[in-house]
Image (tube, rainbow, N blue to C red):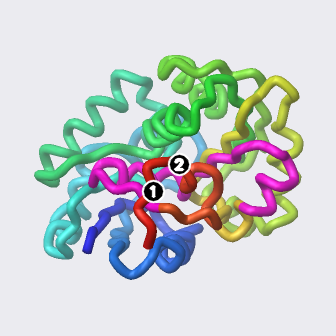
Amino acid sequence: MTALGFLYPGHSAEDDYPRIEQLLGSDIRVELCHTDIGEDAHRVDALREAGSAARLAEGVEELRLAGAETVVWACTSGSFVHGWEGAQEQVRTLARLAGMPASSTSFAFVHAAREIGVRRVAVGATYPDEVTGLFADFLRAGGLEVTAVRSSGIGTAAEVGTWGEEDVLTLARAADAADAQAVLLPDTALHTVAHLGLLEKALSKPVLTANQVTVWEALRLADRRVNAPSLGSLFTREPLVQV
């Protein structure tokens, strides 16, 4: 049994996680702890506060008691708004607090892109332009080439959480670019897990989404490889551990 720990901000698309757990198989357990986000706003100051050490520390003990072996801060914007170096410090602090390997969704996107062998990516974000630009900067700092960026200008995670399949597909199509090897959809408030097959079929290329890469990152930290094709191209890489 591998127990994966996640600190998830507020309540928006957390039901993606039990769905992923079901698809991964019986020897993977997903432990989710909700953190207090403070003000629900896609503004840089509010997002930095949401990912502060004090807020992250609140959920660490719960994950430890649940037997988690790794922990991921399941928030893209609450990590990349600190910049590459700041996000690294955030993860180091989380690892010290938790006493276990740690990462965040922002780093998960970079690592996942490397895993599937892509360098040129397009971004379709729910955020306002300023916040989306910071995510693109973060990806570039991680060695990726951002060929296209699309912002939706949504101000809160609560609103993003109401989006359905057609909204997600529309965003992905609008973001796609001919020279992009993959399309990235940040924001863990966005429901995407049920739509991964449709997204990749519609775009004919890999699609990486926030909750998907977050769980993959936790598995990577636990040194697990799981073959689960319904979770997209990211979960069909060699070597495979069949569940």
Q: Locate the C terminus by quadrant.
A: bottom left
Which residue is painted at 20% across and 75% down in the image? Answer: 66
Q: Nearer the viewer, residue 30 or 155?
A: 30
Question: Is residue 177 among what the camera can see?
Answer: yes
Q: Nearer the viewer, residue 196 or 12?
A: 196
SS assignment for the magenta stretch, majority: helix
Q: Position of residue 216 (x, y in %)?
A: 45, 54
Q: Quadrant location of residue 29?
A: bottom left
Which residue is painted at 13% across and 44% down in the image? Answer: 96
Question: Is residue 38 among what the camera can see?
Answer: no
Q: What amino acid is at disc 2?
A: Arg
User: Does residue 150 show up magenta in the picture?
Assistant: no
Residue placed under numbered mark 1 in the picture: 240
> What segment carries the magenta color?
197-226
48 left or right, relative to 128: left
Say which element carries label 1: loop
Q: Nearer the viewer, residue 134 or 218?
A: 218
21 left or right, relative to 97: right
- For label 2, the crowd category at 10 Å Cα-Cα, with few meaning under 14, some 14 to 19 and many 20 or more, is some
Residue placed under numbered mark 2 in the picture: 237
Is residue 185 depicted above or below 137 in this figure? below
Residue 98: image tag: none
Q: Position of residue 86 (x, y in %)?
A: 34, 26
Which residue is painted at 51% across and 40% down in the image? Answer: 112
Q: Are marks 1 and 2 in contact (CB under 8 Å)?
A: yes
User: Does residue 202 show up magenta in the picture?
Assistant: yes
Q: Quadrant location of residue 63?
A: bottom left
- For label 1, the crowd category at 10 Å Cα-Cα, with few meaning under 14, some 14 to 19 and many 20 or more, is few
Q: What amino acid is at disc 1?
A: Leu
Is residue 133 depicted above or below 64 in this figure? above
Say which element carries label 2: loop
Which residue is painted at 29% across and 37% down in the image? Answer: 90
